[in-house]
Image: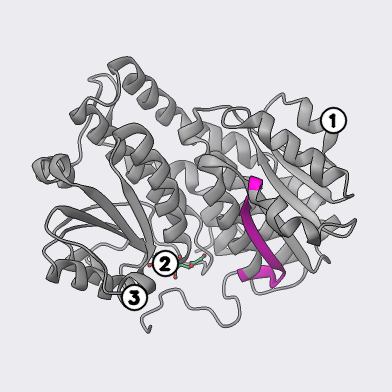
């Protein structure tokens, strides 16, 4: 059942090229230069008239929501707020029939997310679900939705659910951008082309596996770890830190790289590994100067870089390469080495990767 892999998590990490392809299949029609999503099409008026989109989710799905915030605002020019479902539901939110709520959930059973949906509906909002499990409670409770077609995710640490959620949300943002005219037709076509190339590039990113295992071996005994990223890759830093925490029990924090100097920099010494997402597009020079700041404090730098990068390579203790893509699609690639890094650290420490202590696959209690 693990398809020759030692753990479900590793199997699911490696399934991402297929899962992403399955998720855009039949929706991304590149030759016709269109995106077809019934749940969006049928409610186009609501989407076009919406004052704002509020995304509610928990955990890794919330991180996918944060990535979506960048994509929706950047491409479709719709204001987006991203909320933890547990906070949203208990703080008397200001929301009405001109708002669209997008609920993201792999399992479709998360209690807080389900409660947030019910609250939003009671205030008249239109609620759209992005779920993986077909026929789940959240899928049934929402007005419309789009499934991720990741297939069953068994490992407690979410991997392919995350990248397929980002895929669905990217398709939605592109579809709405086209309808609103906030993206040119050539830019739209370029996005379709690049998105279609992502599964092959994920495959390529997965080839760093053995190199990542070596890095994992060097840092597995660390007590703390920082993850830094900017822009589209800030949420990826949060997700990288969550992955490490949940399966290896090493304390980790994700930060926007520029926030480092507002506090976390005090933690940096020669014992602190810092994973920095420093891909070519997206504030590259700024991230390079953040790396210099870390280096002068003797922090150990693991850079996630674009293939062929030289500048970060010259500064960092280690680099892990991912193929080049559009900035907006880069989270689909930069996430991969972070999943593998936490996987290998947890395995090397002898932890139960697929069923970490204290965690459940679906959190049906609040
Ligand atoms: C992390 C993880 C959790 C879930 C969270 C939401 O790897 O699995 O943080 O992402 O419990 O679950 P869903 O997406 O099922 O609502």
Residue labelled 2 has its Cβ within 8 Å of some atom of ligand 1: yes
Q: Where residue 98 sits in the image (x, y, percent)?
A: 14, 53
| Residue at 84%, 35% in the rendered image | 315
Q: Is residue 265 visible?
A: yes
| Residue at 49%, 64% in the rendered image | 1
Q: Is residue 306 visible?
A: no
Q: Which residue is mark 3?
A: 112
Q: Which residue is mark 1?
A: 314
Q: Nearer the viewer, residue 365 or 160?
A: 365
How far apart in space, not on screen, are marks 1 and 3 (Cα)?
46 Å
Q: Is residue 255 magenta?
A: yes
Q: Which residues are magenta?
A: 246-258
Residue 10: which numbered mark, if any? none
| Residue at 20%, 47% in the rendered image | 51
Q: Which residue is mark 2?
A: 58
How far apart in space, not on screen, are marks 2 and 3 (Cα)?
8 Å
Contact (CB < 8 A) between labels 2 and 3?
A: yes
**Image quadrant of residue 258?**
top right
Whether 184 is drawn above or below 274: the answer is above
Whether 331 is drawn above or below 191: the answer is below
């Amino acid at each position: 059942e693990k398809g020759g892999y030692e753990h479900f998590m590793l199997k699911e990490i490696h399934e991402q090229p297929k899962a992403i392809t399955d998720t855009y299949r039949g929706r991304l029609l590149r030759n016709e230069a269109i995106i077809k999503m019934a749940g969006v099409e049928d409610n186009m008026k609501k989407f076009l008239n919406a004052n704002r989109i509020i995304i509610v989710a928990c955990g890794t799905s919330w991180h996918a929501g944060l990535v979506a915030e960048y994509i929706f605002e950047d491409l479709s020019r719709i204001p987006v707020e991203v909320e933890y479902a547990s906070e949203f539901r208990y703080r008397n939110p200001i929301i009405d029939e001109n708002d669209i709520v997008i609920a993201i959930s792999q399992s479709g059973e998360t209690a807080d997310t389900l409660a947030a949906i019910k609250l939003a509906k009671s205030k008249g909002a239109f609620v759209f679900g992005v779920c993986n499990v077909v026929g789940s409670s959240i899928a049934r409770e929402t007005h419309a939705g789009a499934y991720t077609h990741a297939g069953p995710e068994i490992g407690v640490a979410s991997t392919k659910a995350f990248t397929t959620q980002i895929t669905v949300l990217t398709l939605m943002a592109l579809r709405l951008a086209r309808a609103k005219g906030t993206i040119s037709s050539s830019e739209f076509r370029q996005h379709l082309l690049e998105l279609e190339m992502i599964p092959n590039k994920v495959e390529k990113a997965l080839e760093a596996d053995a190199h990542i295992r070596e890095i994992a071996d060097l840092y597995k005994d660390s007590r703390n770890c920082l993850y830094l990223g900017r822009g589209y890759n800030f949420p990826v830093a949060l997700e990288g830190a969550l992955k490490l925490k949940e399966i290896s029990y090493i304390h980790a924090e994700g930060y926007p790289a520029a926030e480092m100097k507002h506090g976390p920099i005090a933690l940096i010494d020669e014992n602190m590994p810092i994973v920095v997402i420093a891909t070519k597009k997206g504030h590259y020079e700024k991230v390079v100067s953040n790396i210099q700041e870390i280096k002068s404090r003797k922090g150990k730098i693991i850079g996630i870089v674009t293939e062929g990068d030289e500048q970060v390579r010259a500064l960092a203790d280690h680099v892990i390469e991912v193929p080049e893509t559009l900035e907006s699609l880069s989270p689909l690639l930069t996430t991969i080495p972070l999943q593998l890094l936490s996987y290998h650290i947890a395995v090397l420490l002898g932890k139960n990767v697929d069923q970490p202590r204290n965690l459940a696959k679906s959190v049906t209690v609040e």
